[in-house]
Image (cartoon, rainbow, N blue to C red):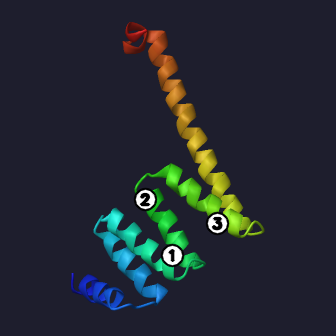
Amino acid sequence: ATAKNQLEKYITAGGRDAQIYGSLAMLYRSDNEMDKALATLDKGLVLQPNNKDLSNEKINIYLASNRMEEAINGVKALVEKDPNNTQNLLNLGLLYDNGAGKLTDEIRKLSEETKKGGDLTKKV
């Protein structure tokens, strides 16, 4: 709590060090305050829009809080800024692959439920 308070004071006083924004966001994240963490990162990115660490931490928070669409959009933005960065392209591909896998599992479950004549058949 003391660390968060001191870092917040630094930011309120107009501090511009990206590491401070990242550190505060990590503290919020560890306390499961994801919205505060994201807001802190956004403030840091306003001051330093090309800071890769802040952008990557924002994507990590989206992933940790299961906000896949926002994570995909964040990685897409990184790819647009630097289309030759193969790591960003790989990460985008992995996100799409994971999303496809989840959808495949969901379709399989729905298909099995339909075959059993469960709630889906009744609803139709």
Query: Is 111 displayed left or right of 36 in the figure?
Result: right
Which residue is found at the position 53% from the left and 39% from the top?
A: 102
Q: SS for tag 1?
A: helix
Tag of residue 62? none
Camera-near label (1 vs 2) is 1
Separation of marks 1 and 3 at Cα, in angstroms: 12 Å
Which residue is found at the position 32% from the left and 86% from the top?
A: 12
Check disc 2 and report the residue beneath it: 64
Which residue is found at the position 49% from the left and 11% from the top?
A: 115
Check disc 1 and report the residue beneath it: 54
**Amino acid under label 3?**
Leu
Q: SS for tag 2?
A: helix
Image quadrant occupied by the C terminus = top left
Separation of marks 1 and 2 at Cα, in angstroms: 15 Å
Q: Residue 67: where, in percent of width, then height?
A: 45, 52
**Camera-side residue of 99 and 55:** 55
Say if 49 sits above or below 100 in the image. Answer: below
**Camera-side residue of 114 and 70:** 70
**Camera-side residue of 43 and 105:** 43
Earlier-in-chain disc, 1 versus 3: 1
Earlier-in-chain disc, 2 versus 3: 2
Evaluate if marks 2 and 3 touch, with contact meaning CB atoms under 8 Å apart: no
Q: Residue 111: where, in percent of width, then height?
A: 52, 18
Camera-near label (2 vs 3) is 3
Check disc 3 and report the residue beneath it: 78
Separation of marks 2 and 3 at Cα, in angstroms: 18 Å
Q: Residue 83: where, in percent of width, then height?
A: 75, 66
Q: Residue 118: where, in percent of width, then height?
A: 39, 12
